Image (tube, rainbow, N blue to C red):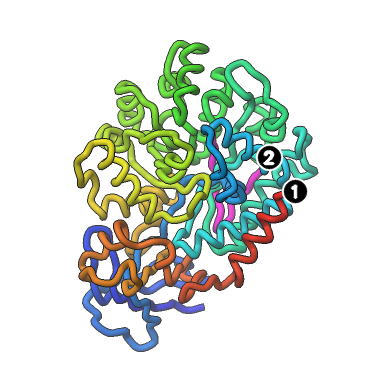
Amino acid sequence: MTETTYWLEHAWLGADVESGVTLTADGPGGPRAGRITAVRTGTPAPPPGAEPLRGLTLPGLANAHSHAFHRALRATVQVGSGTFWTWREVMYQVAHRLTPDSYHALARAVYAEMALAGITAVGEFHYVHHAPGGTPYADPNAMGEALIAAAAEAGIRITLLDTAYLSSGFGQAPDRHQLRFSDGTADAWAERCSALKERDHARIGAAIHSVRAVPAGQLATVARWAEERRAPLHVHLSEQTAENDACAQAHGRTPTRLLADHGVLGPRTTGVHNTHLTDTDIALIGGSGTGTCMCPTTERDLADGIGPAVALQRAGSPLCLGSDSHAVIDLFEEARAMELNERLRSRTRGHWTAAALLRAATADGHAALGWDEAGTLEPGALADFTTIALDSVRTAGPLPRLGAETAVFAASAADVSHTVVGGRHVVRDGAHALVPDVPTALAEAVAALRG
C-alpha cells in the first residue's frame, strides 16, 4: 500500500492548534510502515487525493491503566453504599467467572469502546492468570493471549502489564478469590510471563499489584525482570490508607519507601493512584523519575481520595491518565477531572494548561506504556491520531485556536469522529470499522459474566 495523505482541518501539534495541516502516513509494507512521514502546515484546502478530517485532530490518546473485566461492573456497583473493600468483593465475583473465551469477548468490546473514545493504546494491568482455584491453563498465558488478541481485533495497541499478585496481605497467603491471580512466587511469575512475545501492536511490561500483594523479599525479582528487558513497570501505590497502615505495621515504613528500598522506583516505573503520600514519599517518587498515573473517575467512584498530582509533577514525576475500572471510558473526562479535583482541594484555578493535560493523555501516557514513538503528530511518530468534532452541542462556539481548551474542558468521548492507528482508520465517522456493533458486543459479553 502507498502513502495515505490526510488533510486536518485543525490539529494540535503539541503547543498550538494549527489550521490546514497535511499529514502523510506510510501504509503497510512501506519502509516506515504505519508512521507519519510528513506534516505540513499552511494548507487551507485539502490537496488532491487527501482525505479530509473535519474538526480537531489530536495524537491518539493513551489509556495508561485498565482492568478490562471491570467494565462488567459498570452501574451494578452503584447500588447501595460501602467502601473500596466492599466494591472489591463484587469485583472478585466477576473475576471468578472469567475464562479465556469470555475474557476475549469482553476485552474486544471494551477495547473497541476505547477506540470509539479516541484511545489508540491501552496499558492492561493484567492479573487474572489461571483458572479458578489457581490451576494453570494448558497455555499458562491463555488469559494474557486473549487480551493481546482482543486488542488486535479492536484495532488498538496494548502494553500487557503482566502482574505479580502473590499474597492477600502482608505475610498472608492468597484467599480463595486470589488463587487464580497467583503464580506462587515471583520467580514462577517471571518464568511464565517470559514466554509472552511482543507483536507489532503489543508490548509486554510488568506490574506489581501492590506492596500487600508481593512480599517485600520478592519485589526486586519483578523489578529486575523489567530492568533486564527495559520494559515498563507499574504498581498500585498508596491507593488506600489501610494499605499504608498495614505496611507501616509490617515493615515500619511507607509503601513508597518499601518500593524504593527494593529498587522498584525509577524512570520506567509508574505508580498508579499515588493517593495517600507523605512529603518524603513525593520526593522519592519525583526524585527517581517515577511516573504517576492518575485515574480520577475511579478514584472518585471508589471514594479513594484526591492524590497530590501537582506536588508530584513539581517533584519530577511525569503524569499520565487511565480509566482503570471503566466506570466511564473517556480520557477527556480524566484530564478535566484531574484539574477540577485540584481546584476543589486548593480552591484555586489553573493548575495545568489544557496543553499540559493533553500531553498527559497522549505523549506521556504512551511513554509510560513503552510506546515512546507515539503520542505526537510529527514525522517519524506512529500514525496514531484521533479527531473530535467541533460542531457538537458540547464543542460548538469556541474559536478553533482554543481547540486544546475545548478538547479538555468541553469535549467528551462522544465527540470522537475518527480514530486512526498505524495509518489505518479504526473509527470512521463515529463507527468502528472492525467491530460493527460495539454496544451489542458489550451487552452480550457482560451478560455472559452475570452468571
Label 1 vs label 2: CA separation? Answer: 10 Å
Residue 50 place in picture, x, y as percent:
38, 83
The residue where tag 1 is placed is 451
Q: Nearer the viewer, residue 141 or 38?
A: 141
Q: Which residue occupies 73% across, 44% down?
A: 97
> In this picture, which residue range is highlighted in magenta?
195-207
Residue 269 place in picture, x, y as percent:
44, 35
Residue 219 place in picture, x, y as percent:
54, 24
Q: Locate residue 316: give its quadrant.
A: top left
Disc 1 + disc 2, Cβ < 8 Å: yes
Q: Is residue 166 left or right of residue 65?
A: right
Q: Is residue 144 above or below residue 436?
A: above
SS state under label 1:
loop
Q: Which residue occupies 42% across, 24% down?
A: 256
Asked if the magenta segment contains residue 197, the reply would be: yes
Q: Which residue occupies 48% across, 66% down?
A: 422
Q: In the rendered structure, which disc, 1 or 2, sits on the residue that comes first in sequence? A: 2
Is any part of residue 46 visible from this angle? Answer: yes
Q: Dot 1: within a 10 Å radius of its alpha carbon, few (fewer than 14), some, or many (20 or more) residues?
A: few
**Badge count:** 2
Q: Is residue 253 above or below residue 150?
A: above
Q: Which residue occupies 51% across, 49% down?
A: 327
Q: Is residue 64 above or below residue 92?
A: below
Q: Nearer the viewer, residue 164 or 402?
A: 402
Residue 429 place in picture, x, y as percent:
46, 76
Q: Locate residue 18: give its quadrant.
A: bottom left
Q: Amino acid at mark 2?
A: Gln
Q: Dot 2: within a 10 Å radius of its alpha carbon, few (fewer than 14), some, or many (20 or more) residues?
A: some
The residue where tag 2 is placed is 93
SS state under label 2:
helix
Is any part of residue 269 visible from this angle? Answer: no
